[in-house]
Image: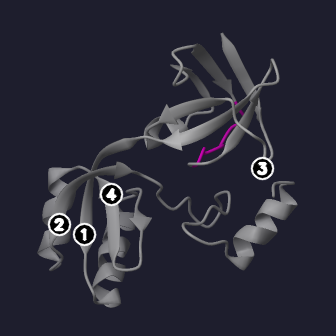
Amino acid sequence: MLVIEQHAPHDAAATERLVLPFEQRCKCRLRTRAESGEDTGLFLERGAVLHHGDKLTANDGRIVEVIAASEALMEARAADPLLLARAAYHLGNRHVAVQLGAAWLRFANDRVLRDMVAGLGLPVTEITAPFEPETGAYGHGHTHGGETTFGAKLHLYQGRP
């Protein structure tokens, strides 16, 4: 079994891949399989959320890259940022994980949530895509498509590139 207990530098060359949906990337203890089919056990620090592109070091020295699996999602699009902010607010108020883009937001495929967001005036479609929701103000500083100053400082604080 491939045993993983620590993170690796982002620039490390991976020899294995671990393809996981968001729900599994939130678990600090997980038994799963690497893309190669090898049994894999994750034993990471509590509260760790794995993101697409993260690198991990297995106990035998192999580097494993985390890949965000495609999953069933809802996507709401709007050119009006206020409308998107309202939808994000209402989803967050229900403790729903939300991924934000320039003119869209994504959340888990759920009929009730779809109806709520559509009721706010946003068209909602079902899609299949990797899910990288925001981790919140106290998360690991992960960003989508560019490092923020806060995220860069947090990565330096954590000893990550």
From the image, give the main secondary structure of the stretch colored magenta.
loop
Q: Which amino acid lies under the numbered mark 1 shown in the image of this protein? A: Ala
From the viewer's perspective, is 29 left or right of 111? right
Specify few, some or many for label 2: CA neighbours under 10 Å numbering under 14, 14-19, or 20 or more.
Answer: many
Query: Is there a contact, CB below 8 Å, between mark 1 and mark 2?
Result: yes
From the viewer's perspective, is 102 left or right of 58? left
Taking the spot 62% from the left edge, 67% from the top edge, the residue there is 137
First of labels 1, 3 by sequence position: 3
Question: CA gap, disc 4 to disc 2?
Answer: 10 Å
Find out whether residue 45 is within the magenta segment. yes
- Quadrant where the N terminus sits is top right
Regarding mark 3 in the picture, which secondary structure is present there? loop
Query: Is there a contact, CB below 8 Å, between mark 4 and mark 1?
Result: yes
- Quadrant where the C terminus sits is bottom right
Kindly identify which residue carries mark 4: 107
Q: Residue furthest top?
A: 1
Q: Is residue 79 above or below residue 159?
A: below
Q: Which amino acid lies under the numbered mark 2 shown in the image of this protein? A: Val
Q: Position of residue 67 (x, y in %)?
A: 53, 41
Query: Is there a contact, CB below 8 Å, between mark 1 and mark 3?
Result: no
Q: Label for residue 76?
A: 1
First of labels 4, 3 by sequence position: 3
First of labels 4, 1 by sequence position: 1
**Residues drawn in magenta:** 44-51
Kindly identify which residue carries mark 3: 11
Q: Position of residue 62 (x, y in %)?
A: 76, 25
Q: Which amino acid lies under the numbered mark 4 shown in the image of this protein? A: Phe
Question: CA gap, disc 4 to disc 3?
Answer: 30 Å
Q: Position of residue 24 (x, y in %)?
A: 49, 34
Q: Label for residue 124?
A: 2
Regarding mark 1 in the picture, which secondary structure is present there? strand
